[in-house]
Amino acid sequence: MSEYKEPPMLDPEDPQGCLYGIPGLHGGALYSVPMYMVEPNPNNPRKNFDREELEKLARSIREVGILQPLILIKQADHVFRIVAGERRYRAAQLAGIGSVPGIILQLTPEQEAEVMLIENLQRKDLDPIEEARAYQALLDGHGYTQEALGEKLGVSQAHIANRIRLLDLPETVQQNISRGIISPSAAKELLACKKAADEGLTVKQTSEAVAREMWNASKSLSKEEWESPSFDISICDKCKKKTMLKKPWGDKEALRCLDADCWQTKQDESKKQGVEEKERKLNAKYPDAIVVTYDDDSFERLNNTDYCREKNCNDFRKARYKGADWVMDICFCPDKDKYKACQAEAQQKRERERVEKEEAARAEIRGMVDAKLKVRSDRKTLVYIATIILENLNPLWNADTNVFQYVQEIAAGVELEDATEDNEETWIPEMLKRFSEEQLFRIIIEWPAICDGMKEGSIIEWYLKDTSSPDDEGKKHEEPAGRTCRVCGCTDFRIVVPSANTYLEWDIKWVEPDLCSSCVDVAQEDPVPAAPAARSYIDESGKEVFASDGIGGETFGTFWRSPSGGLHRVKSPAMPMVATREEAQKNLDAWAEKKGLKQFGSDQKELTVIVKEMLTRDDATEDWKSNLAILTADELLTCIEKETRPSARSKFYKEARRRKLSTKAEVS
């Protein structure tokens, strides 16, 4: 270790000639300044100096000297004013030394005030009142706002405002705050009392104002409060600042901390530990992921990584943002030009793959179209259909062809006179008139497939992939009309779609005299034994009774339905709740036979499928409303006769009036 060397003594006649060579702030340098040339600063925010502490420091200075130099500025010839270090200066006076080390700076008044305040704040040497006066001096003398001053000093605007409010208290109270007799948090309560006295409030109003001020100045120690602590409150068990306060808006009390600064410190530490613990878990969960920040521009996010994986690129990485529980693919390449060239190459490769895939699909379509070109029809009709198709169907936005290019491709040996991409409406009909039937058929079959693609389950796929011959197709559907499907109940002009609970008007196709094309797969399955027909009866009171399941759906019995739609059980020893519907039906049949009950609907014709659906489905659904319009007149009148729900029955009557049908007396 090199030997310590005293700074050179400042020459009063030549203050600039004694530079020691240790640069300071604003061009300052270290000097050894005689004590008679140093004066305290009258603007120093610190006014109170403990006598015992000064004597301890004086003894230390006698033994080892002043280790940290004073900060000085030149006030006049041979006079220097203290900016920072007045406590060391006072202790040096008590120690009786002749000079002190000091750094002489050149500062503006604003810089001088900032340095004095910051130096005292960093050392925590100021009491709350001194701190408040220093803040007030900077605000008044240098044009700062509280927000700007807070950013400059690294404190919050609320802290500055709360400190300055202490200056509104009487001088005696300020002295007690400086001495530590009254804490800043308790001083806020005194401010509330002072405000109450100034405004002439009553004792009750003053008490409420003090309670409200104490509540606002404190922090919650309860997990139920919205600003609950994230730290373990058991560490505050023996703290004197922990107390119960009455809530300003009610009679209940809550556990609060009167030391807001201590509470905030613990809260920040707890949150910091929570963030660190979360990061440790995320690092364990994603060990290979690089942690990056949102303002980091040294990487690029990747949407498609197939090309990077194929190249086995070293710059391809997994990464995650700090605190994020998800990973992303990034390129860590430092050369941005290389990254852009690599992305362009990957885009070209994807485009080539897309074109190859499209060409393969086009070739598949062309092969299937060739198999369909055996069909012949009226030439004039073919020209008409092909023209409509070409004029109204457009290819996908990313396809490599259009109508003009496609017709040029089909028109082998046919001249396209005056044909351009801008006059399709005029040349397409004239050009198609010169095409052969095979060319026209190709356009009719192939162009829709090119425009829409071979979507799974589409009509295009269904047609092109059907390999049956036209003769077989004709024989299959030459069945007489007036048939009914044995599976779903379809007729020649009504197709039942059970999955949609609706009916479509369409000409169906028959594969057998009593089997429609939509039920072929169902008919080929193993036949399931039919359940015994459900029978209902009319009891002595005129109610329809029938076998049905209970509320749970696991037991069955005999029930009757009220006009509102509710099920009510018929309680009889002969008809207990049983495990199967068949057994419940047998019990009902035996009971009805013994009672001599008449079977319900025995003298009426059987209900159609749509009538049964309308009587059992919820009348508030859209499909019920749409089916209402396609009911025949007889079916509508049957629904009115059989319906027991008031809301549905009213809708049936309304539809009957709209059709001007004659009905019985309407419901009241």
Image (cartoon, helix red, strand yellow):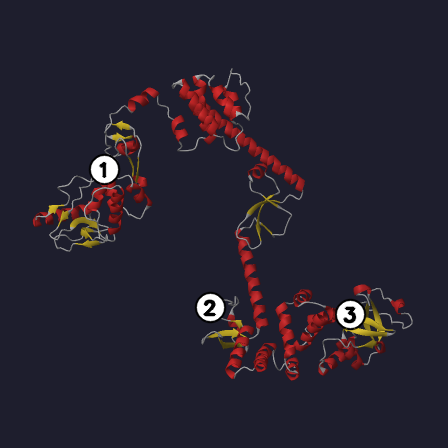
Under mark 1, the amino acid is: Val
Residue that protrudes farthest toward the top in the picture: 413
Q: Residues at badges 1 and 3 in contact (C-beta under 8 Å)?
A: no
Q: Position of residue 383 (x, y in %)?
A: 43, 21
- Front-most of 425 and 153? 425
Q: Which residue is mark 1?
A: 528
Under mark 2, the amino acid is: Glu
Under mark 3, the amino acid is: Pro
Q: Which mark is residue 177?
A: none
Badge nearest the viewer, 2 or 1:
2
Element under disc 2: loop
Give how far apart the Cα atoms at labels 2 and 1 are: 62 Å
Element under disc 1: loop
Identified at 81% across, 71% down, the residue is 73
Q: Which mark is residue 109?
A: 3
Q: Which residue is mark 2?
A: 224
Badge nearest the viewer, 2 or 3:
3
Q: Residues within 10 Å of mark 2 (few under 14, many from 20)?
A: few
- Front-most of 66 and 214? 214
Instruction: Locate residue 156 relative to residue 616 in the image: left or right.
Output: right
- Front-most of 661 and 606? 661
Q: Quadrant of the N terminus?
A: bottom right
